[in-house]
Image (tube, grey):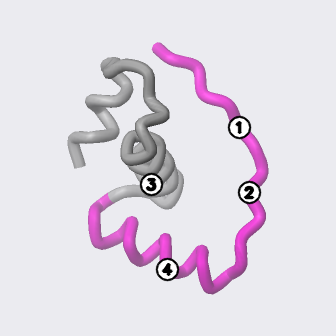
Amino acid sequence: MSKKKSFVLRISPETFNLIERWADDEFRSVNGQLEWMIHKSLKDAKRLKSKSSDDDAIDEK
């Protein structure tokens, strides 16, 4: 199992509400939605080095 790093994220309530609604639409938690958004941004920017099993799990949705 891969280890995940925890950190505090400060965002406006309006931004949080928008992400929360988006996550609900896609049957994800807010945390899962943020992970997906970050992963997609890294992939689109060609910052990911290789495909791993963790990447597959995020891409499923």
| Separation of residues labelled 2 and 4 (CA atoms) | 15 Å
Please state the horizontal and vertical placement of residue 5, each as a whole percent of the image.
67, 31
Q: Are marks 3 and 1 in contact (CB under 8 Å)?
A: no
- For the residues bearing labels 2 and 4, Cβ distance under 8 angstroms: no
Q: CA distance from mark 4 to mark 3?
A: 13 Å
Q: Which residues are magenta?
A: 1-27
**Closer to the camera: disc 4 or disc 3?**
3
Q: Which residue is mark 4?
A: 18
Write down the residue under mark 3: 37
> In this image, 9 relative to 17: left or right?
right
Residue 49 placement (x, y as % from top left): 43, 21
Q: Residues within 10 Å of mark 1 (few under 14, many from 20)?
A: few
Q: Residue furthest top?
A: 1
Disc 3 crowd rating (10 Å Cα; few below 14, some 14-19, many 20+) is some
2 or 4: tag closer to the N-terminus: 2
Q: Which residue is mark 2?
A: 9
The three-letter amino acid code for the residue at tag 2 is Leu
**Cα separation between marks 2 and 1:** 10 Å
Label 4 or label 3, whichever comes before in sequence order: 4
